[in-house]
Amino acid sequence: MLPKQKKMNRRLKQRVLMRVQKELKQKKVNRILFQRVEVKKRVQVRVQKEVKRKKMNRTLVQEVKVKKIVQMRLKLRMTSQKEKKKRMKVKRKEDNRTLNLKKNIS
């Protein structure tokens, strides 16, 4: 199943772009795709570059790896991990509470 894609808000796009602008210029990138992957609650940024091929007389699209984006992806993933742990902690607390209540009642 494909992850559901949601439109990204402009601010988020801008933030991503600001971070990677320099690197993109060096790599002569002229196409950027933004996708927000809802499954893992993170932003997927795909950077592509159109390459003109003289022999075949057509443009090819190449994926470009951008270090900053990879780092960002990691960072975004880390935050979600933290949140997960937090949620688990809260849940555990609640479970304990209910357990104690049950003990008191019985």
Image (cartoon, rainbow, N blue to C red):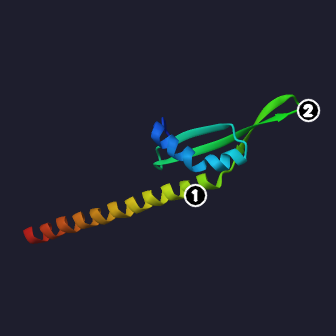
Indicate which disc residue 55 carries.
2
Q: At label 2, which amino acid type do we have?
A: Lys
Residue drawn at (33%, 60%) of the image: 87
Relative to residue 25, is residue 84 drawn left or right? left
Residue drawn at (54%, 40%) of the image: 35
Residue 103 visible in this rendered orientation of the protein? yes
Q: At label 1, which amino acid type do we have?
A: Gln
Sequence order check, earlier mark of 2 and 1: 2
Looking at the rendering, in which quadrant would you find the N terminus?
Answer: top right
Relative to residue 14, is residue 87 drawn left or right? left
Relative to residue 106, is residue 11 drawn left or right? right
Give coordinates of residue 72: x percent, y percent: 54, 55
Indicate which disc residue 71 carries.
1
State whether residue 27 is above or below residue 77: above
Relative to residue 106, is residue 32 drawn left or right? right
Helix, strand or loop status at disc 2: loop
